[in-house]
Image (tube, rainbow, N blue to C red):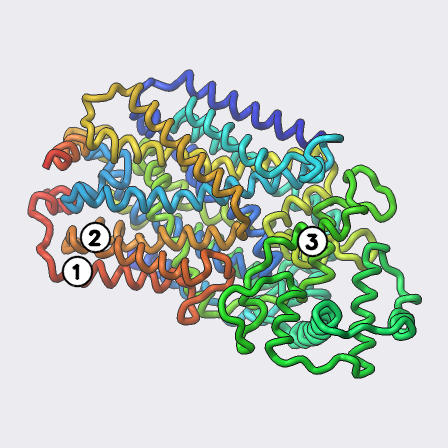
Amino acid sequence: MTQLIIICCYLALLLGLGVLASRLFQGTSKDYMLASHSIGPFLLLMSLFGTTMTAFALVGSSGEAYKEGIGVYGMLASSSGIIHSLCFFVLGVKLWKLGQKYGYVTQIQFFRDRFESDKIGILLFPILVGLVIPYLLIGVMASGTVISSVTEGAFTNMFAESDYGVPPWLGSLVICVVVLIYVFFGGMRGTAWANAFQTLVFMALGLVTFLIIADKLGGLQTASEKVVEKHPSKMMRAVTEQEEADHIQQMKIWRKLAAYNWMVDEGDLKLTDEQLTEAHKPLESMKFPPWQAAFRKRRAEARYASENGLLNPLSAEEQLKAEIAQDDRVVKGELSAEKSFKEFPKSGNWQAEALGYFKDQIDHPDKKTEGKMTRKQAMGRYRAMRWAPEAPGEIDPWMFLTYIFVPLSVGMFPHLFQHWLTAKSANSFKLPVVAHPIFIMIVWVPCVLIGVWATSATVGNSNTPLIPPHFNPNGVLAYMVTNLTNPVLAGFLTAGILAAIMSSLDSQFLCIGSIFTNDIVTHYAGKERFSDRQTVLMARLFVVGIVLVTYILSLMGVRRVFTLGVWCFSGFSSLFPLVFAALYWKRMTKAGAYACVAAAFGSWAWLFHASNYGAKPHFSFLGMMPVATMITCSTAALVLVSLITKPPSAETLARFFPDKKT
Amino acid sequence: MKYVVWGLVVLLLTIHQDIWFWEDNTLVFGFMPIGLLYHACISLAAGFTWYLATKFAWPLDEEPAANSAANSSTEKSERGASA
């Protein structure tokens, strides 16, 4: 309950900040959307950084480090330090200048002018909004997960299905409503203030979290040494021979278990009572929690049956079926012996099966009765004992190399474009350009270390892992915070995590409202038709609609925050050539722009479909990150079509490429 | 100096591909994996490089007058809409 109270106080504080900013609101749409170009260097740094560091940076980085190891920092953090600032430098400053000169509020206004095309706005509008939705989804999903994890046990009689904590759907809903309110009250000024405040909160609390968690794990040195001892591959980007060999051995045992279970459940294998007694004998000298008994007995039976030649060799197809069943997957498409069980999707029923299996042992988290567990623990234990062992992760050098294209997305984020335009002067960009890579390091290094430590942390002095295998990566940070700190601190730290999430959501909410009113409503209905107040109202209504769509999507399925983020960023990156060439290549034409957008969208949609809509976290194309193919396609289309079509008019060239001497 | 700055950016992107620490899990200072420390140093080096960029390769010569939106895009886009 303590955590819940602290979170509520924090959200109330944010609302207060929004109201305060609204007192300074000048009532014009320009003030609402661009804070009347009044943002100085410090506030610009904080708002740009707070906007780019989202759930992806905290929840996603720690979760991905838990799954893949320290390589995640090089893949996205250090590369972002170089590329983000590059984008601020080569795009941000120039776009700010053009925005000042021609009064732009949104990207689409710039593209319409630069390409002398009204219709480019119609093409870009759904694509940009469509790509912002998964970005919003990352924050909405992560906020629900985090709040639910840390408030576990806060209620005595309510929300049993979420272990008596705030259910994820309610947590996400509250965050959406709070952000909507302070964005509506404060507009861009309120957003910039809230971002600055929240960025300071999550950076400060992040460092505190890191030090406390390190201390609880026995100190920095002990925590890291444990990882080197248990999961050395997490501390580099390759897999050690020993870990590889261990995994192969574990898979052999698991395959036998799958075959045994399949032959018992689907076939006619049945051990006699004497055989069962003999099989269970080794367990008598072993100590394990009571809930493991049934699983361990099955494993012991499988071993006994295998050692005594009772397992009839299965055909390749039968073995595949056995592994699919053991890993709670379902057969969709062709069942071919050539395939691995991992190619089949997870069954939607496994949670129900897990909960049914432990139904007599599930209780309130505060009841520490022997053998009792929470629903989350029940599902975790079921997965850990039943599913295939997790393979140690390694990072492919080609994937690592082509990850460098992902941060280019910053160049096309519509909300960052809007933030760039809020700057008071071009000099305001200097501090963000320099400090951004360092700020990234301050946030990401602790998160990555917490993620890798989580792989090897144990409960007290025992050998029991703190986090069981197959744990949801999105929940790693919240789980570490809840289990290794006290309730007061956990509440503050959760506020810090939520601060990072909300400092991105607010900019995105404001931005989609701006592009709707400026690029669609005012653009087609005429500026005189609506008053400033009406324009702001329409922006708000559109934002509510988009947030509602995002919220509904968040209820429909769970994807790894990191995977979802990478697909979303890849889409924006594939449009990077559009903005870069628009600013630096005079020969770029309207047709070239259309070709670029079509190629970017076509290649993104095709590859996203091929990845089973993000369900394959390690999806690659030609051995590289899909973003490399997308950028190649969009660049090639842009260059080729521009070269064979009529160049832009002299008037446009004069507007965007003025002679430096004049 | 401008070319030196851009050369440093290219150098940063090149040394970012550190295949030499791919299979090394040595702990520096007893807790920091060398691969992570190396990339944290790249972040610091990026900050320094961008500092040099703002000093010696700043893309704008002068500050344009604020809010000189005489030829606003809205007017332009309205023309476009009616076209």
Number of labels in the image equals 3
Contact (CB < 8 A) between labels 3 and 2?
no
Q: Residues within 10 Å of mark 3 (few under 14, many from 20)?
A: some
x, y percent for residue B68: 19, 29
x, y percent for residue A509: 41, 34
**Residue furthest left as drawn:** A650
Q: Mark on residue A641?
A: 1
Q: Mark on residue A594?
A: 2
Please tell me whether residue A315 is drawn above or below residue A207 in the rendered image. below
Q: Compare residues A62 and B36 and report the one nearer the observer.
A: A62
Q: Give the spatial CA distance, label 2 vs label 1.
A: 9 Å
Q: Earlier in the sequence, mark 3 or mark 2?
A: 3
* Residue type indicated by callout 3: Glu
Q: Mark on residue A353?
A: 3
- Tell me the mark number nearer the camera, choosing from 3 and 2: 3
Q: Give the spatial CA distance, label 3 vs label 1.
A: 56 Å
* Residue type indicated by callout 2: Tyr
Contact (CB < 8 A) between labels 2 and 1?
yes
Q: Chain of mark 1?
A: A
